[in-house]
Amino acid sequence: MKILKMLEASDSNLEWFKDHLNYLKEKFDQNYVAIEEGGVIAFDKSMDHLIQKLKQLNKDPSKLFIQFVSKIKTVL
């Protein structure tokens, strides 16, 4: 049951990210953002610094949706 809740939260945060991508690009360009419950709870240009911030907030980074946001399109 706990795993199912985590998967549902992850899906919800992914959908929120996609729905708000243009806003995120304007406000958080070239930053990593941590999203929880449909909102950005922390951001930083460095993943290491972001993880430090999350730990200060008593948040487990492995349980959050974290993504790099950029106005520049990348090709993989």
Image (spheres, rainbow, N blue to C red):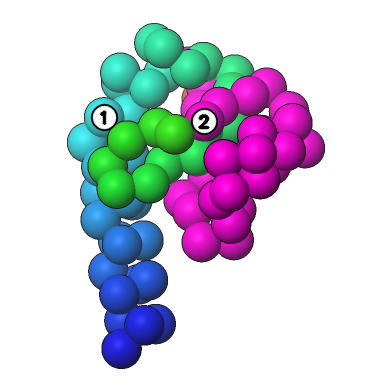
- Reading the image, the residue beneath label 1 is 20
Left or right of 68? Residue 50 is right
Q: Residues within 10 Å of mark 2 (few under 14, many from 20)?
A: some
Q: Quadrant of residue 54?
A: top right
Lower sequence index among marks 2 and 1: 1
Residue 75 visible within the image: no
Residue drawn at point x = 31 percent, y = 81 percent: 4
Q: Is residue 27 left or right of residue 50?
A: left
In this rendering, position of residue 48 left or right of residue 22? right
Q: Nearer the viewer, residue 56 or 65?
A: 56
- 51 to 60, vertically: above or below: above
Q: For the N terminus, which image quadrant?
A: bottom left
Q: Residue furthest bottom?
A: 1
Q: Secondary structure at mark 1?
A: loop
Whether residues under marks 2 and 1 lie with C-beta atoms below 8 angstroms apart, the answer is: no
Residue at numbered disc 2: 42
Sort mark 1 into few (<14), some (14-19) or many (20+) by Cα contacts within 10 Å.
Answer: few
- Magenta range is 42-71
Q: Quadrant of the C terminus?
A: top right
Side (left or right) of 55 relative to 68? right
**Residue 66 part of the magenta segment:** yes
Residue 60: image x %, image y %?
58, 57
- 58 or 72: nearer the eye? 58
Which image quarter: residue 40?
Answer: top left
Separation of marks 2 and 1 at Cα, in angstroms: 16 Å
Whether residue 22 is visible: yes
Amino acid type of the residue that numbered disc 2 sits on in the rendered structure: Ala
Residue found 32% across the figure and 35% down from its top: 39
